[in-house]
Image (tube, rainbow, N blue to C red):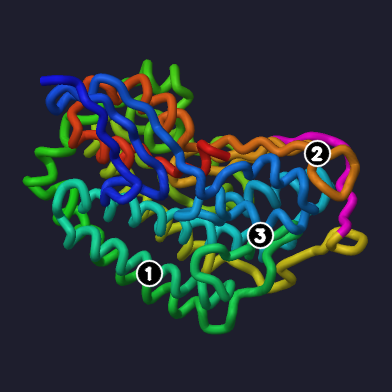
Amino acid sequence: MKEMKLFLGPQHPGMHGNASVHMFVDGDIIKKSYLLPGMLHRGFEKAMERKLWVQNISLIPRVCVPEPDINEMAFAQGAEKLLGIEVPERAHWIRMIILEFARISAHLMAYGGLGGPTGNYTLMYHAHADRNLILDIFEQITGARVYHQYIVIGGVRQDLPKGIEKDMHKFLDSLESRLNEYRDLGIDNPSIIKRIKDTIMLPEEVVWELGVTGIGMRSAVNRENDVRKVTPYARYDQVEFEIPISEYSDARSRLDIKIKEVQQSINIIKQCLTKMPEGPVRIKPQGQSMRWIVPKGHVYSMIESSRGEFGYFMVSNGGIKPYRVGVRGASYPQGLLGIEKYLPGTRIDDAALWVDTMGICSPEIDR
């Protein structure tokens, strides 16, 4: 059969965002492939240099739409280090609540995304219905469902609304009680096991070669390598949680870790709600907020996203705008380099599973 070119995405149910995988195939075997990240969200690093420090809070959530809050945290944390300020104690705990809800939301989107390329739309509908309830909670807290602009330099924009804790507990208890149902629908479903077991392997040598972090690393090298544990930020050193790992690196193992991480995020949020003190939630740097002068210096601010280490390298020349900003997108190694080098040799129907289980957020690549 003559080799021909096919496109996966962005309209394909197995593709996340506006990216597209271009594949040259011989029969159903991929011979060559590369990722076209798309041109919807791009050029963030240069755009940040042209905006005031405070203005970037409204720009950066778009670097990863399914999990926008990680950008706010990494950026705000870096700016706070350069400014030499410490956020109020209550703000640390609220930030953790927001970040863990964002992690659950991203994992549900990825796990539900498995339903598209495997034909299990019940799984997809259930996952997106629960994710929609998380967006309801975000809307109550921030006034927005997707781009929250809530974690800001100096803390969080405003305190939690009264009574939100009850809604959080209600959702978390409901989701926790149905995690086994999610397993039955997904990774323990015989029809799906045939598609995801022993496929899309990610050996240890590939992890080190590409620089894969997060679930990709933890499923391949059997190490509890998580920024929240290795270099704790906020108050992650004051809560108890486990880092799920695996000794096998196929697609099923990575999805299994996602479900286990949802359980750990539920545990973290419940501890935050119990331990969170009263008090202020924001300290504003001196001077007019629209013209903050950030001292000269550079800093690398990293956090653990649902896809792995996510960081901002930020340079200030002592002005009112960042001099340079570099984004370390967690999905860059496996999303760009991995697709070009290691997707060839697999089958056409494996491409969507690669994108879904590896965790690809295209603006992190075309940034």
Magenta stretch: includes residue 298: yes
Within 10 Å of the Cα at label 1, are there few (<14), some (14-19), or many (20+) other Cα atoms?
some
Q: Give the residue displayed 91% in from the left and 60% down from the top.
A: 286
For this view, does 47 lie left or right of residue 138?
Answer: right
Q: Is residue 338 magenta?
A: no
Determine the CA span between mark 2 and mark 3.
18 Å
The relative height of residue 341 versus residue 56 in the rendered view (above or below) is above
Tell me where residue 138 appears, x and y as whole percent: 51, 70
Question: Most extreme residue toward the bottom, as rendered?
Answer: 163
Which numbered tag is attached to residue 323? 2
Return the residue at label 3. 58
User: Which stretch appears magenta?
Assistant: 291-300
Name which residue lies at 56% across and 56% down.
69
Q: Which of the 4 image quarters holds residue 205?
A: top left
Q: Are marks 2 and 3 in contact (CB under 8 Å)?
A: no
Q: Is residue 319 left or right of residue 227?
A: right
The x, y position of residue 276, in whole percent, is 60, 67
Which class describes the residues within 10 Å of circle 2: few (<14), some (14-19), or many (20+)? Answer: some
The label on residue 132 is: 1
For label 1, the SS is: helix
Q: Is residue 292 above or below residue 48?
A: below
Neighbour class for label 3 at 10 Å: few (<14), some, many (≥20)? some
Mark 1 vs mark 2, foreground winner is: 2
Q: Please state which of residues 295 and 55 is positioned toward the viewer in this rendering.
A: 55
Counting residues from the start of the chain, the first of labels 1 and 3 encountered is 3
Q: Earlier along the polypeptide chain: callout 2 or callout 3?
A: 3
Q: Secondary structure at mark 3?
A: helix
Residue at 46% over, 61% down = 101
Q: What's the residue type where badge 3 is placed? A: Ser
Lower position in the chain sequence, tag 1 or tag 2: 1
